[in-house]
Amino acid sequence: MEKKAINDDLASQKAVADSHATPSTVSEPLHTPLYDEHVALGARMVEFGGWMMPVQYANGIIEEHKAVRAGVGIFDTCHMGEFRLIGRDAARLANIATTNNVEALGLVQAQYSFMCNAQGGVIDDCIVYNFGDHTFICVNAAPLQSDYAWLKQLRDQRGLDADIINESDDTGKLDVQGPKAAALVQKFTGTDLSQIKFFWATKGDVAGVPCRISRTGYTGEDGFELFFPIEETVKLWRLFVANGAAPSGLGARDTLRLEASLPLSGSDVAAPGNRNPVWAGFGRFVKLDKGVDFVGREALQKAADDPSGERMVNFFVTGRGVPRTHCSIAKDGEVVGEVSSGSYGPTLDKFIGMAWVRSDLSAKGTELDVMIRDKPVPITVTSRPMYKKP
Amino acid sequence: MENPRDNKYTNEHEWVQLDGEDALVGITNYAATQLGDMVYVDMPTIGVTVAKGEAIGALESVKAAADFYSPLSGEVVARNEALLDEPGLMNSDPFTSGWFLRIKPADPTELDDLMDAEAYDEFEKSQG
């Protein structure tokens, strides 16, 4: 038995991390404040986006996945990045840097969005918040430094009056996810969580710790992303774990988001212009008519008008085999696309994936093959989300 | 989980257990733990002749893929069909119900080249 290169999303994300690497990230992987907690819980630690992170704990990915679907799980997401934008043009800068319409946000509302390049390719995906006196943006770990540099460059290019404060090093983040997440967090806060709708947020204390409480996540379940002073991370982690949250690693995070048809930045949506969010099927987060000349607008308008580009589809494997990132998609022996994410979906109990395929082969029900170890394995294009919470 | 004392082992983390004229083969608990939750196995067809060291099967967990290298030369005489529906047996019970193949050895002296349990215990420790 020899474990081969893990041809999976983590590996491709690592490649993205490398391609984004700046001098500050080409060094020893960083540790979040929870490193010792993870190791003590029997986690297998892997390098991810410049950080040593738990891919799974002792019970394994499938158990963690099921715990999040049925109860509540907790993820260390301290590696992710947070920017606070202040000043007269703060919201305007966010609106130029991202594809969704920041001006449409109500107070303490959040929106999923993309930072695109001029070709319409995805630099990163993010969540943008309107906190009234500032705009808050949560970004991925691997491209954090390049995102930050890009925002500053964009501000200077457009002559905007905004300060971009990179709070990533001072911000702890935990994702508490699952149907029982609200009940768990509610035990420790005076904030009435039932008043926070999906993709809304508030500021409030949790166990005495001042938090941004955001009803968002990356699992397809109800839940919260909590942002707080980083020195409080171990205290909050231990509190939630002691009260029933199952520690869950990057492996479960990946299978949960894949079942929920949520894209992985750098893999499913990525920097090449032909992996743009419009052709990926996320056009509802791209507001071409928002009245702002945002980065990538022209290219994305062309993409919206052009039916010929490859499309991102979701698929079920109907034969036997595990699709992995970069496996070819074929039709009658001809290569017509490529897998951008693939794995086993524990809740669906199916092998599933996302792939970029020729546009005329992207309709639901289309039968194609995924090439696994040079053999065609039948798949069927399906609609998204592949998993929807009950 | 203890490595069974009567088995022989390879440095690819496979075990071999003599059973009459045949040999049962599988992966060790160490291998199964390293791979994580197994979700798919690809097995050779019955009757095929395999060479020692040849990649004859594929094992896939949620996050990883691995080849299964034949620890012996010989003929595949049976496969653990239960793994097709329940590959997780390789995690939960790697040395018994999680067996992979039954091979009729072409040259039983090949077994002499494999590690005994004590040597494999040491080898496993050295893997860190």
Image (spheres, coloured by chain):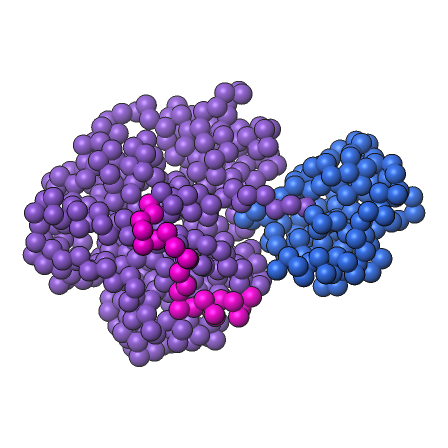
For residue A21: magenta? yes
Q: Residue at x 7, y 56 (%)?
A: A88
A23 sits left or right of A75 in the view: left
Residue A125 pos. (x, y %): 30, 47
Whether residue A125 is visible: no
x%, y% of residue A21?
34, 47
Residue in the foreground of this view, choosing between A270 and A148: A148
> Is A139 positioned to the left or the right of B59 in the image?
left
Q: Residue at x 43, y 53 (%)?
A: A48
Percent position of residue A35, x then y:
45, 66
Chain appearing in blue on the rendered image = B
Give the percent coordinates (x, y) of residue B6.
Answer: 85, 57
Q: Is residue B127 visible?
A: yes
Asked if residue B31 is among those painted magenta in the image, a careful observer would answer no
The residue closer to the viewer here, B52 or B41, is B52
Would you say A45 lies left or right of A31 here?
right
The region drawn magenta spans A20-42
Instruction: Give the quarter of the image for residue A122.
Output: top left
- The residue that appears at 35% across and 40% down in the rendered structure is A269
Residue drawn at point x = 75 percent, y = 33 percent:
B45
Q: Which chain is purple?
A: A
Image label count: 0
Q: Quadrant of the C terminus of chain A?
A: bottom left
In this view, the residue farthest toward the right is B20
In the figure, A166 relative to B81: above or below?
Answer: below
Q: From the viewer's perspective, is A170 left or right of A97?
A: right
Our reading of the magenta stretch's main secondary structure is loop
